Image (tube, rainbow, N blue to C red):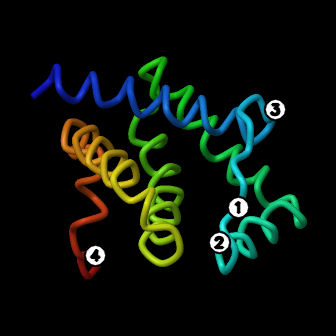
Amino acid sequence: MKIVATVARFLLGIIFLFFGSNLFFHFLPNPPMPPGPMADFLGALATTHYIYVVAFFQVVPAILLLINRYVPLALTLLAPVIVKIDTTHILMAPSGLPMAALVTIMWILVFLRVKVAFAGIFEPLSQQ
């Protein structure tokens, strides 16, 4: 399990560093946008420059995963990004769902390796 989690951590870091950096530097050609809600959604992200916030929250955790430092923090920062990716692909672009599911599975594998760091948030607050 340790090797699987380590491979998942590296792959997750590489994926988010690569695609997050692409949001900043645009080194991949943009495919034509399908008409409809997906085009509107991505257009709104680009117009408002919110896409740079998304890119930041992909690149920084990716670096933390790759250098194996603050992995629980990196997972915490990536969780809402992955939820957004999953939701976007479920509701607007189902063709990307296999890759989104793979990223989610890798996140879970890394989470299971460091779940002890999250133990406190799954316990009810004791009455004092």
Q: Is residue 85 above or below residue 5?
A: below
- The residue at 23%/75% (across/down) is 124
- The residue at 42%/45% (across/down) is 75
Image spot of residue 114 (x, y percent): 25, 38
Image spot of residue 70 (x, y percent): 46, 32
* Distance of label 3 from label 1 (alpha carbons): 19 Å
* Dot label at residue 38: 2
Q: Amino acid at mark 4?
A: Leu
Image spot of residue 113 (x, y percent): 20, 36
Point out the frontmost of discs 1 and 4: 1
Q: Name the one closer to the observer, 88 or 77.
A: 88
* Distance of label 2 from label 3 (alpha carbons): 21 Å
Q: Secondary structure at mark 3?
A: helix
What residue is shown with label 1?
Answer: 33
Point out the frontmost of discs 2 and 4: 2
Q: Amino acid at mark 1?
A: Met
Lower sequence index among marks 1 and 2: 1
Answer few, some or many: residues within 10 Å of disc 1's Cα (few below 14, many 20 plus, some between 14 and 19): few
Answer few, some or many: residues within 10 Å of disc 3's Cα (few below 14, many 20 plus, some between 14 and 19): few
- The residue at 75%/76% (across/down) is 40
What residue is shown with label 4?
Answer: 125
Q: Amino acid at mark 2?
A: Met
Lower sequence index among marks 2 and 3: 3
Q: Name the one closer to the observer, 104 or 38.
A: 38
Answer few, some or many: residues within 10 Å of disc 4's Cα (few below 14, many 20 plus, some between 14 and 19): few
Q: Quarter-wise, where is residue 19 in the image?
A: top right
Image spot of residue 123 (x, y percent): 21, 68
